[in-house]
Image: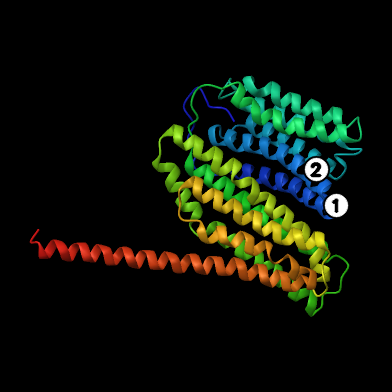
Amino acid sequence: MISPTRPVEDVYRVTTLELFFDLVFVFAVTQLTGVLADELSPLGVLQVVAMFGVMWWIYGGYAWLTNTLTPTTTTRRLLLLTGMAGFLIMALATPGAFKDTGVAWGIGYLIVVLVHAGLYVQGNSNILRVLPANLLAAALIIIAGLLDGAAVRVLWIAALLIPIAMPYIVPAGGRFLIQPTHIVERHGLLVIITLGETIMAIGIGAEGLTVDAELAMAAVLILALVAGLWWVYFDRDDERAEETLSAVDDGTRTQLTMFGYFYAHIPIVVGVIVMAAGVKKAVGHAWEPLHGGPAIALASGVALYLAGQVLFRRIMRIGPSRIRTAAVPVALATIPIGLWTAAAELVALTVVVAATLVAERLAATRAATAEARGVRRDDSDLRESGA
């Protein structure tokens, strides 16, 4: 993510092509959910984290790219569509990326990197300073696809860490002028699409099953949980974040965007991925005990999502986070309930999220009431003093 050397173009709203791009990216995220659902183990988590980290790094690069350079010309649109093709190849290769399709995954990533650089260089030639790190990451993944064993995992971790470390080792120079409305809307839409991926997991988990009262109730319970997570993110937090970004100087805005929308959104998106893996296992067996993996996935996914929200709020300076912080361990405490029955864990998690929202609303109401009383008291003191 590099700063431009000339003024940012007028960018205020996310274009439909960017939304189209995000749909392909979320398809790749959906594939990660499938990998985790098939291997709910520490090794499976490591593989998903490595693949997601590499994807997220370059996705962030595209989000910042289109915040600076609008995809309005034919050339830019064709290049962005080519980048989408690269993501599609990565998505298709994801199930076997650590086995027999690693080379294809690396080639897809190489396409994404080259397109990103080809577009970005039109507005900022400093992209060439970090391009070698992105190319090296693609090369490492391709090489990993030719190997097996522990070497594959080592190369993947290196491919993840090298591009992220490069901007701190080789400063890009210049400034980055962030368009607050665009960056907030872009990531908000991404969160909505990612939450929709959990709804898709209901259909995948219910495939081939009879649509009876039990299945319908399980689907409704999952929908209620997802709706609660939507409410947590969009209950004015996005509006307040935009207000914060608009009120600060360019340098501070760049830092807040990096830490708030790149780093803090990692647990938010990963939380949805992990939860969706649990949903796939739970929807067809909602009235039965869950195995440890799916029960942990459901609870830890919600906990990660809430933890990301806590981090996001603190970075963006948009309100207290004590209630959401307290909700994280409570969400994790529902794991034993899932070992009793999946539906009970879904209900418990929904109650945790709903209680968090209600508690925050009551706290906000009390704070507003106290502030109003303080203002009235100040006015009364002024009148009594004759001011």
**Residue at screen point 12% across, 64% down:** 383
In this rendering, is residue 5 above or below 207?
above
Picture quarter containing residue 246? Answer: top left
Left or right: 103 with respect to 10?
right
Which residue corresponds to the image point at 48% horizontal and 23% vertical from the top-left?
A: 6
User: Circle 2 is placed at which residue position?
Assistant: 47
Position of residue 180 in the picture relative to residue 279 (left or right): left
Residue 270 sits above or below residue 161 on the image: below
Q: Residues within 10 Å of mark 1 (few under 14, many from 20)?
A: some
Type of the residue with mark 2: Gln
Residue 203: image x %, image y %?
79, 63
Residue 247 x/y as whole percent: 39, 42
Q: CA distance from mark 1 to mark 2?
A: 10 Å
Q: Residue 106: which quarter of the image? A: top right
Q: Secondary structure at mark 2?
A: helix
User: How far across and how far down the image is residue 212, in percent?
Assistant: 81, 78
Q: Amino acid at mark 1?
A: Glu
Quarter that holds the C terminus: bottom left
Q: Which label was assigned to residue 39?
A: 1
